[in-house]
Image (cartoon, rainbow, N blue to C red):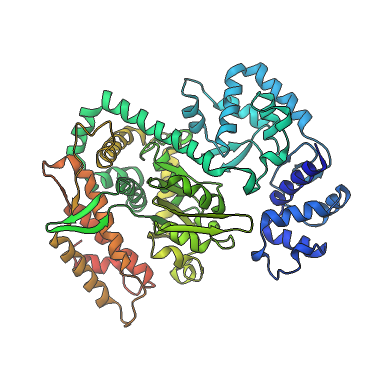
Amino acid sequence: MTSEDRVIERKILLKRAFSRHRLFEIGKKFAIPYFEPFETAWNIDEDQAAFEIASSVSDARLRELFDSQKPRGWVAFRGRYYTFEDGALLLKSSWDTIESNLRQVSKKYGKNGLDVLKVFLETGKGCGLRDIAISLRRRIDPEPIVNELERLKIITVSYQSDSYREWRILEETSPLVQLELGMTAPSALSLQAVSAEVDEVDYVTLERQEIEKMDTELNQYLSDLLKNRLDTAIQFGKTLSVTALADYLKKLFGPVLYFDSMLSITQQYGLADVEIVHERGKTGMRTGWNLSLFGEPGTGKSFSTRDMILGKPDAKISPHGIPGRNRYAGGMTPARFIRIGQAYMNRIFNFIVPEFNDWFKYKGMVEPLKLAMERGEIKYELHREVVGPYKFGSFFSVNYNVATFGRGYEVTVQDPNFNAIEDRMLCRMHRLTKQRFIEIAQSQMRLAFGEIDIGKNARKIRDHLTLVYAIETRHPMVTDRFMPKPVRITPQAYEIIEKARSAILEQIPREVVTFSARLEDRAIRFACSASLLKYFGSDLEYIPVSEDALKYAIQLYVEEASVRSRQEFMPEEVLAKLQL
């Protein structure tokens, strides 16, 4: 390794071990010129800040820095020159040990062990057991191999919830693993070639490879469905409605938790972005919409937006979402998202972001993220590059963690970035009420004891969803069998919306309304998306907005209007007046 490589490794270590604010304090303390013009940490570039410190300190100074500056004790670093484990910095390599451990894995598991490692390398991000099994495409149980790789410190946990984990190969370890697997030549081993510098990684090309994998996943699933389960899916679709979906979810989770999973699954139907029409022509609207569940951690947001859609095999939760059309963005930075968004031009996917509020903490990210939520044209300027302009056409399903104690909304709106998403998404607030707490606890217990069979009907719903999506998006596998249908909104639907609006406004004593008219737009899109569940319900050339879809849309409209009005009225009273 060259001295430049040592600096790059040191930079990666510093960025991982210290927050942006701590890097700022270190840079100021060491009087490094880069930091002089900045008054706050928010204005610095983290990559550049870490690089400037790495270039300015010796190994002895680095050790002093770690002894005095309280690094993140939970992170791990296993490089060729530096090791950081259990909160302690060692000025020695981890590579000799990892190299020996890699040979143990090869000897014990042979080709299967090496193939699991290749999945981690090729993915370049956190992988769960399901991700690995899908990538391998053959009958291998990856769990014992992954457990051994973690024990031998070849991989590390990158995400963990109560019953789900993801792992990854550390950035500084990746070159060694590549070399051992014969995936790179020794001359290409420099850490500089795999560092996080944006001008050294072609994120767009890598993301296009990811899109190809997702396209393949959809095509394989659809092909299997058409060959083996088409008649069953059509028959199931003739009885399916949003009410039937709600009843299925209520039996699983109870009368409170079910609604969020219903929103997530309904949003999946909306991803076909079907045209919404009326009896005289076009409305200019389509069924796609963004979803945000916001509120306190631990209230079931991730379960609804991620686990129910992608599945969670370790917890015996089968996927309900469209295969190959949901891009999980856990661990992804907003800057990387803005870059890879170029790969999604003229394509519609759903980005599942587990902690969307973290994305707004990065300097300069609010405006491009607003444009992304609006499906607008994005252009982003960095000190090294200009990204875009490009048109972003995909959607989001996100969690926005924020404290909502008591009535809660007053606290939420104090978050200066929440307004950026409020009018651009269908938002639903989570508070850990007694009823929600009871249902979460009971669901966890029933899942643990195998009393909830989420797989029983998940395949039927997923088959129907995938088939309707393929038809409405004119997938070549189905164009000779089915015709896409628009969703027709009726005058009666707008009358119901108007009645709900009048009932809400009557309950608000002030002249000023604290929610946007866009909330009605989202409610209508939800109703139209929910009506797609009844594609096979009639022989009409269009899909009429169903009464039960409107019922749930009005419930959503009234409840969210109450939240955004600081609960100046009780939604139950308005719904009772509307006989809902």
On the image, which quarter does residue 290 sit in? Answer: bottom left
Residue 194 place in picture, x, y as percent: 67, 39
> In screen coordinates, is 405 left or right of 149?
left
Q: Is residue 92 above or below residue 554?
A: above
Residue 78 place in picture, x, y as percent: 73, 38
On the image, which quarter does residue 232 sit in? Answer: top left
Q: Quadrant of the N terminus?
A: top right
Viewer-closest of 481 and 185: 185
Residue 35 can be seen in this image: yes
Furthest-right residue in this view = 60
Viewer-closest of 384 and 451: 384
Write the residue at 72% across / 39% down.
191
Residue 176 place in picture, x, y as percent: 71, 30
> In screen coordinates, is 189 left or right of 549?
right
Write the residue at 73% across / 62% down.
24
Q: Is residue 508 above or below residue 317?
A: below
Q: Is residue 394 above or below residue 574?
A: above
Viewer-closest of 294 and 522: 522
Write the residue at 24% across / 77% down.
506
Residue 422 place in picture, x, y as percent: 41, 64
On the image, which quarter does residue 97 sit in? Answer: top right
Residue 431 can be seen in this image: no
